[in-house]
Amino acid sequence: MRQVLSFEKPIHELKDKIAELKKMAAGSELELDAEISRMESRLKKLELDIYHSLTTWDRVQIARHPDRPTALDYIGELFTSFVELHGDRLYRDDPAIVSGIAKYKGVPVTIIAQQRGKNTKDNLFRNFASPHPEGYRKALRQMKLAEKFNRPIISLIDTKGAHPGKGAEERGQGEAIARNLLEMTDLTVPIIAIVIGEGGSGGALGIGLADSVQMLENATYSVISPEGAASILWKDAALAEKAATSLKITAKDLKALKIIDEIIPEVKGGAHRDLSMQAAYLDAYLESTFNRLRKIDKQTLIDNRWNKYNNLGGFTE
Amino acid sequence: MSLKTIFKKKKKYAQIPTEKAKQEIPEGLVEKCKHCGKIYYEKEWRQQLKVCPNCGTHHIMSAYERIDATVDDDSFEEWFETLISTDPLEFPDYQEKLVSDREKTGLKDAVVAGRATINGYSAAIVVMDTRFRMASMGAVAGEKIARTLETARTELLPVIIFTASGGARMQEGMLSLMQMAKTSMAVKRFSNSGGCLINVFTHPTTGGVTASFASIGDYHFAEPKALIGFAGRRIIEQTIRETLPEDFQTAEFQLEHGQVDRVVHRHELKNLLTTVLDLHSAEVTES
Ligand SMILES: [Zn+2]
């Protein structure tokens, strides 16, 4: 069953009408071609209007669409020879983060990715892509290997946040994220982070400190969920829509704030409409960034990374 | 203006004495322990550094109270004190909240930084003050911490950070989150140059501060019973649908789980910092 997002309702209603007319025309002598073609051009215009003026909240819904492609979907489309590697060598393997080595355009790379489940059972296994400390430590292990073998790192971000749980706290969730930020500061290989769905706060940043941060057009990246912000600020989770807008969490907002570097366009209606075409869009951006970063010498790479984050503003003297 | 006069102006814990206490206390303000309720004269309260002699509760200190309790008299030289937030997101009501916290605390934002001596040993000091927006980390806090680490790196000073934070400065959105990256990167550069970072966890240290510079110091000390954690208790309880033990995420819990080196009584802190600074300043001589 298709999931209809609220802002898409007028499109689906019109589509249903057109389908009905077509059915009627087929079963009778009625001359409906003119009417159908009139409605079809209206549909085109409606789609254009709606998909070109998506609000922040519309995009939140697209980013959370259950059929939205996951990290493993993109890995399958973009990379070859993928070898998944498990475990943090300290405690356990965290299925919320998928990591491994593969080839991108024939070049060996390291992949680190937050993985949502495809269904309820899978989501329970993946913990809804909310990593434990072990996930971040597994990621760090892969990053160190990437540095050792001079492989660029491609990080796919898709999480509501780091897991808030008892074991996660006991095993140092804060430390695990902090340690990744510390070590990513001067890794001598290019790091490209792409937010493909939801970028949830520190849990996203824990694998997201990068030379180039890219976002799919309808992805979101936020310091707190809109619902969380609304309930803390205005004691009302129903004001999430207002909070989402105020928090400036869309790719366009974050590009303007210089927090991300590239916006990757999505197929009309959202990435879930056409995985292979979406992967092709992503591929184009990734490839050009990949080629550009690989040419930069190690020290310049680290200096640029430092400058980028150190220059983020929001204060005056 | 000396630090003592700055914090004397604020009598946050002043309480109206009971009728009985009024008879016994002729004049001057008294302070009441938030935990056991015992009442103390202002002077004793200050001498005790806001630690209740009866039950041992360490009460929250303001930034200047902390500095005064830690550094040598008149040795503190404040850095970057003019930094203020530009409200980059034009977030609803944020300016008003900043203005009101500035009036309430006399601070421009939640972090005070500078250089001082501690029993003669020079160090850079950062103190987070929870009275200002729960010491949430926005661009000003991040910038002050990063600049302090950079200045200390070039001037070869050890850095002591008294951490406290309710988490991210929500009203600064993703720019607030990026302070985690900025401060952690500054720690790395400082550390690569051989700099010594001592973090003292005070109540409460949570969220993005725990998930950045606070958790990657060289030495982690914590005040007794201080709350230290990443996620908040309420959100964890909602997620796992169970009640967490009383001592969850306390300093003692973090000591047991390996995240802090020592839990230190406030009265012992200055001596401990002095000893560690001394161990880092001693000339290395071959024997
Ligand atoms: Zn007491």
Image: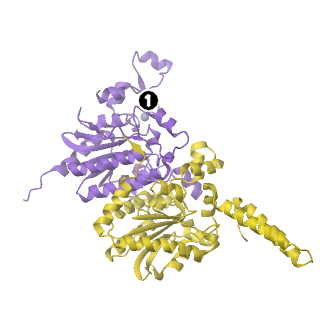
Chain under label 1?
Answer: B
Tell me the colour chain A is drawn in. yellow
Q: Residue A85 location in percent, x, y?
A: 44, 78
In this rendering, would B25 be left or right of B2?
A: right
Viewer-proximal residue among A98 and B37: A98
Residue B183, image x, y percentages: 36, 53
Quadrant of res A292: bottom left
Depth check, front residue: B178 or B65? B178
The location of residue B260, given as percent across then percent down, is 35, 54
Quadrant location, ligand no. 1: top left
Q: From the viewer's perspective, is residue A46 above or below residue B43? A: below
Label 1 crowd bin: few (<14), some (14–19), many (20+), radius 10 Å:
few
Mark 1 CB in 8 Å range of ligand 1? no
Q: Please determine whether, in this image, residue B119 is positioned above or below residue B238.
A: above
Mark 1: which secondary structure? loop
Residue type at tag 1? Lys
x and y percentages locating residue B244 in the rendered image: 53, 53
The residue tagged 1 is B12
> In the rendering, what colour is chain B?
purple
Residue at 32 percent across and 43 percent down: it is B126
Left or right, A206 with respect to A27, comes to: left
